[in-house]
Image (tube, rainbow, N blue to C red):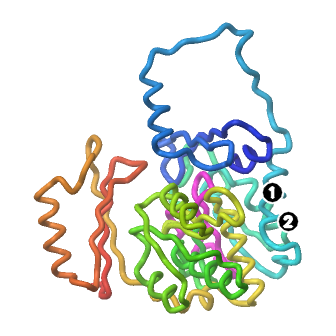
Amino acid sequence: AIAYLTRTLHACAGIVISASHNPFYDNGIKFFSAEGEKLPDDFEKAIEAEREQPFSTVSSEKMGKATRIEDAAGRYIEFCTGTIPFEIMLRGLKIVVDCANGATYRVAPAVFEELGAEVSTVGVDPDGMNINENCGSTYPQFVARAVLEHGADAGIALDGDGDRVVMVDSKGEVVNGDELLYILATARQDKGLLQGGVIGTVMSNFGLELALKKRDIPFKRTPVGDRHVHKALVSNGWTLGGEASGHLLCLDRTSTGDGIVSALQVLEVMVSNAKGLAELTRDVQKMPQTMINVPISGEVSDLGSSETINAAVKSVQDQLGDTGRVILRPSGTEPLIRVTLEGSDAT
């Protein structure tokens, strides 16, 4: 919403207080440029460097003013509904929307209801501390249960600040970001609207890469993080990319990750093809993946500098051969190292 409003109001920047997909105590700040895009790494580092300098103040009469944008929610709802063709309506669709007790708790249900869907909601009772707590895109079991209880056609699980989405099919099976990317890419290809290929990350399941290859859709990987995906999309002149976590970028629709907009693109495909999520993703055979989070103290500058870690990774990679991968990466938001194994066989 802030990315959109920053652009439409011709503001110099947008600033968001955000817990993202994390607990409330990991609250942070996101900046958006005047174009509604996240700031580059070097720009953020320059801001952090400035913070180390002595602070100065100006007299009260030289300070700016704060004003409330009274119609902000209405503007954003109109923008979201405008990202799918006007003839596409969601009448007849029963969906469950999990707002993770976060930023979208009012707006998201209104968007889907305005388009005609029958909406049931969960995770819409924020108290300032329950954001992402056993709900939302990082805990899709919550919305999956609700989908089965309500006999819904689909479930939509957003994260706390609304830039991620994972979905659930009518049988309660989770459809993650990789599978959603496949749905959007193949639908755009079928309509002749796919610009180039798809950008994923090192964490994108190899099954997605194989499924796209069968459709002759180019696929490239970047380091984890939507800013890396965005940079690769721009440099390649492509528009569609994202992460398995559900952080999708549809640059032909908006300038940054937006869970509501991404979900609408998927619902548009469902309505246009009269197919459910399970049928739309049946050609994606995901390889088994396991990830564990290892707590650390302090920052990690270079995982590859440890001979012990390198030897352990090589040992496991030798066992997996060409049928699997070992991925180690520091979390960008928590004091953790994420260790991921992927292979053709879960054992």
Residue type, numbered disc 1 = Ile
Q: What's drawn in magenta, residue-wise? A: 137-164
User: Residue 208's spot in the image, x, y percent?
Assistant: 47, 81
User: In screen coordinates, is 256 left or right of 137?
Assistant: right
Residue at which label 2 appears? 114
Residue type, numbered disc 2 = Glu
User: Residue 105's spot in the image, x, y percent?
Assistant: 70, 54
Residue that appears at 32% across and 58% down: 329
Residue that appears at 73% across and 20% down: 64
User: Residue 324's spot in the image, x, y percent?
Assistant: 28, 81
User: Residue 288's spot in the image, x, y percent?
Assistant: 36, 81
Residue that appears at 67% across and 83% down: 187
Of label 2 and label 1, which has the lower sequence position?
1
Mark 1 nearby-residue class (10 Å; few <14, some 14–19, many ≥20): some
| Quadrant, the C terminus | bottom left
Q: Is residue 148 visible?
A: no
Dot 2: element: helix
Dot 1: element: helix
User: In screen coordinates, is 96 left or right of 336?
Assistant: right
User: In screen coordinates, is 200 left or right of 321?
Assistant: right
Q: Residue 77 carries which label?
A: 1
Question: Is 334 in front, or is 53?
Answer: 53
* In contact (CB < 8 Å): disc 2 and disc 1: yes
Q: Is residue 30 magenta?
A: no
Quarter where residue 306 is shown: bottom left
Seen in the picture, residue 195 relative to 37 is either above or below; the reply is below
Q: Is residue 146 magenta?
A: yes
